[in-house]
Amino acid sequence: MNTCQNKCVLKVLGVTKEYNHKNIIQNINIHLNQGEFVSILGPSGCGKSTLFNVIAGLLPPEDGQVFVNEKEVTGETGKVSYMYQKDLLLPWRNVIDNAILPLEIRGIPKKEARETVKAMLSIFQLADDGKKYPIQLSGGMKQRVSLLRTTMFSQEIMLLDEPFGGLDAITRMKMQAYLLEILNKIKGSVLFITHDIDEAIFLSDRIYIINGSPAQIVSEMVVPIKHASPEEMMTAEALRQLRSDILKCL
Ligand SMILES: Nc1ncnc2c1ncn2[C@@H]1O[C@H](COP(=O)(O)OP(=O)(O)OP(=O)(O)O)[C@@H](O)[C@H]1O
């Protein structure tokens, strides 16, 4: 299954990364097709964020290559957008001015950048919140601002590193539905890190399981029912089987 079928926007080939002469991830091969939502599911501490840092060009791999739209970009930053686990909003900037950061870095004048962000606020359900500061926002709102800022960098390929990890269960479910709604509007391709099996099943088209020490891709699974309803999540035999197959790999 490890081939590009539709247009392949991101390809990771044989990536190995070590810290202090110890391999953390080894010979990782993954790909992301245009418009796909693909999760990397694995236990805490196995090396998922390390893999994202290599893909984003923030860490050079010991071995292997990263391609974006067929062009090698190993070790190059600025090719994909990246949302970290923590929201990392600047407390002294309001919502709009937090979200314009990627545009400012690209040299777009502040006034123009603010107009661009303002036009997106309602899509992110932040229409009345542009002037608020991070301290005035709930956890879910902070993550929506982070996501907005991430899309301001690039909507083509987004790396989302456990964006809902710190949220309570109800907010997390709302954010998952909200993320799908946003993606439907902006048509991006997403690589998503999680260690929550049901979250991966609900959101993804495909799931890579990463495990071991050093961590490797131990399985690749296609989700048979896309965006299953809560009832299907509980009762569908195909999803029960998928959950069981995933558990065997972890
Ligand atoms: N800069 C570093 N120097 C040395 N070791 C590191 C460094 N960064 C991470 N590690 C180690 O590499 C391993 C993988 O870390 P990483 O953050 O990639 O895992 P993860 O799967 O994303 O974890 P989590 O799900 O808890 O966020 C861990 O054992 C971690 O302690």
Image (cartoon, rainbow, N blue to C red):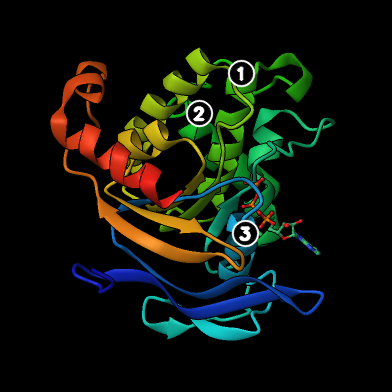
Residue placed under numbered mark 3 in the picture = 47
- Give the x, y percent position of residue 133: 75, 22
Q: Quadrant of residue 70 in the image? A: bottom left
Q: Is 145 placed above or below 103 here?
A: above
Residue placed under numbered mark 1 in the picture = 129
Mark nearer the viewer, 3 or 1: 3
| Residue sitting at the far right | 92
**Pointers 1 and 2 in contact (C-beta within 8 Å):** yes
- Give the x, y percent position of residue 44: 62, 45
| Residue sitting at the far front | 248
- Give the x, y percent position of residue 55: 55, 68
Residue 184 appears anywhere in the view: no
> Which of marks 2 and 3 precedes in the sequence?
3
Q: Quadrant of residue 85 in the image? A: top right
**Which amino acid lies under the numbered mark 3 shown in the image of this protein?**
Gly
Q: What's the CA distance linking mark 3 and mark 2? A: 34 Å
Q: Is 12 placed above or below 244 here?
A: below
